[in-house]
Amino acid sequence: MRPARFQQLLLDAAAGLPGVAAKTFTATGHSRHPYGIAVEAGGRTSLWQVVGLGAPGSRWSEPEPEPILGAKPTALEAPAPTDNLAAVERALVAALLTTDPGEISAVELYSDLPRPPAVGHGATVEFHDGSRVFINHVR
């Protein structure tokens, strides 16, 4: 899974959330990070960067290979997204898991970790092809 394609999947998933508006970083004029989405929920806008780590042996200079499908991870129950970042994080990932055709093999929410990373909120999304995408809250 490449960051550009994942960004579109995340944007599509966010569009299905009630009371949420989402745009790509490009559409909002945010140019510090090449991939990500701005999510408006509960009267607050939060920015979620998308960073990718390719599948073993893949090269970014080559076309993206066909997706590998497999067993889907357990769906997440999510509260309605509000101005609470943990709720937005969980809602985004829950919506993504609902729309996933089977490419995702595992998801780890940062807010569920005993020691979350410095970004505080986000997720690591692993795919059956061996690639990983990181969703990082950046503002």
Image (cartoon, rainbow, N blue to C red):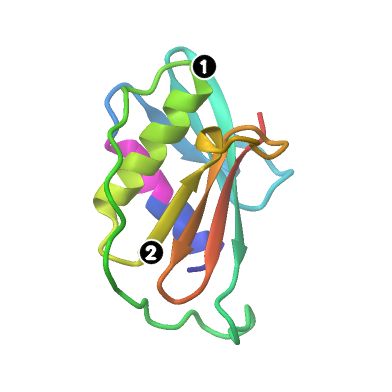
Q: Main secondary structure of the magenta part?
A: helix
Which residue is drawn at the image coordinates 58% and 82% (left, top)? 56
Magenta span covers which residues? 10-16
Query: Mark 1 packing: few (<14 Cα in 10 Å), some, or many (20+)?
Result: few
Which residue is drawn at the image coordinates 27% and 25% (left, top)? 18
Instruction: Name the quarter where the C terminus is drawn.
Output: top right
Residue bearing mark 1? 44
Which circle marks residue 105 in the picture?
A: 2
Name the amino acid, label 2.
Answer: Ser
Which circle marks residue 65 in the picture?
A: none
Q: Nearer the viewer, residue 137 or 24?
A: 137
- Most distant residue in the top direction: 43
Label 1 residue SS: strand
Whether the magenta-drawn stretch holds residue 12 is answered as yes
User: Quarter-wise, where is residue 66 in the image?
Assistant: bottom left
Cβ atoms at labels 1 and 2 below 8 Å apart: no
Which residue is drawn at the image coordinates 68% and 40% (left, top)? 117
Q: Whole-Å distance between the Cαs marked 1 and 2?
A: 31 Å
* For discs 1 and 2, the disc positioned in front in the rendered view: 2
Name the amino acid, label 1.
Answer: Arg
Decide: is 72 above or below 47: below
